[in-house]
Image: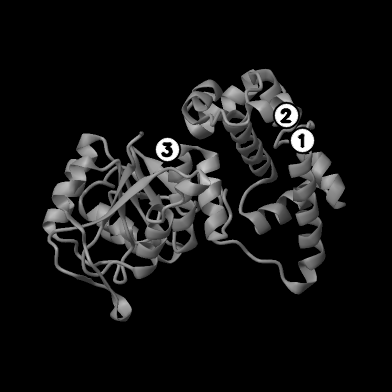
Amino acid sequence: MESAYRVALVAFPGIRAFDVSVITEVWGTDRTDRGAPAFDLRRVATDSASVPMRGGMALLPDRTLDWLPGADLILVPGLDDHLTPAPAPVLDALRQAHARGTTLAALCGGAFTLAQAGLLDGRRAITHWNLIDLLRANHPGTTVVPDALFIEDDNIWTAAGTAAGIDLCLHLVRRSHGAEAAATIARSMVTAPFRTGTQAQFIEHPTPRADRDADALAAVREHALRHLHEPLTVADLAARAGMSPRSFARHFAAETGATPLRWLLDQRVAAAQKLLERTDLPMPEVARRSGFGSEVTMRQHFASRLATSPRAYRAAFSTRSVRDSVAGGSNPIAR
């Protein structure tokens, strides 16, 4: 039987309870009965003493830092006080983990901990939009990206505030175990299974007088998702919304945090991922049904967004469990 994916939550006084809860909900709940992968989440600290958190809560570690060399993924929660100094042994352990090639990920203000360790010097990172100036001021060697939900640089992931931590955690599941595994966990958490990391953090919500435009855009997105296999263009979507392409693009970005073209391509990549995981359809048919038109175009977008090829993705994540249903004519994506 395949061994469980080993995840370490690094704990020290000052970490945020919310981020601890997000990490625990994603990797600490057994969902193998629903087809999700097996995870082995450990709460790792300098010693076995209880770690205090705000609000009278505490976290009880079940491993010390000695467990980190065996981890596949190391997660650093955000901080209540974003300038909280992490214990020197924690910083040393994070540096050693990165040198070994272990994936590191920080939620929200956890980027400050990685920066304390020197791991963000000369690298791109993100944090909560309200902390961007503080991170820049205290760690000028870090290239702080203002408009993103999460980003990666040299196998180090950072995320924006609060809900973006959920997005990053689900993305890391998707990256290691496939889109279907991430969707299973998202359904259990009753949260969106897919938000691209390149979306803006802060989205201007429609005012009451803009509700009509918001409803039109929602209808357009639903139409697009049902017709991904068709050669949709931004101009087509704008016409369906009854707007000029320029006005449509402006309203779309204000509501979703992404341009119409990027959103459409992200949805097509997600559709192709599902087909590659759930079916044995040939690559040209996967490309057609997900709207790329050709295998070459699909391969280009997989390379730019997922840093892999469709064939490699299928080899890694195919469930092979729907072969008979596909032969019988059913398929999760519209024909």
Q: Which mark is residue 289?
A: 2
Residue 235 lies, in percent from the top left, at 81, 40
Distance in Å between CA atoms under marks 3 and 1: 27 Å
The residue tagged with tag 3: helix, strand or loop? helix
Q: Residue at x 55, y 24 (%)?
A: 310
Front position in the image: 323 or 14: 323
Q: Residue at x 33, y 68 (%)?
A: 16
Above or below: residue 171 compared with residue 110:
above
Q: Residues within 10 Å of mark 1 (few under 14, many from 20)?
A: some
Residue 327 lies, in percent from the top left, at 71, 24
Residue 319 lies, in percent from the top left, at 54, 31
The residue tagged with tag 2: helix, strand or loop? helix
> Is 274 left, or right, of 239 in this rendering?
left
Residue 246 lies, in percent from the top left, at 76, 48
**Residue type, label 2:** Arg
Total tally of numbered discs in the picture: 3
Residue 98: quadrant of the picture: top left
Distance in Å between CA atoms under marks 2 and 1: 7 Å
> Is 159 left, or right, of 304 in this rendering?
left
Q: Which residue is mark 3?
A: 176
Q: Residue at x 80, y 54 (%)?
A: 219
Q: Point out the tag, 2 or 1, that comes first from the N-terminus.
A: 2
Decide: marks 3, 2 in contact (CB < 8 A)?
Answer: no
Decide: marks 2, 1 in contact (CB < 8 A)?
Answer: yes
Q: Can see residue 200?
A: no
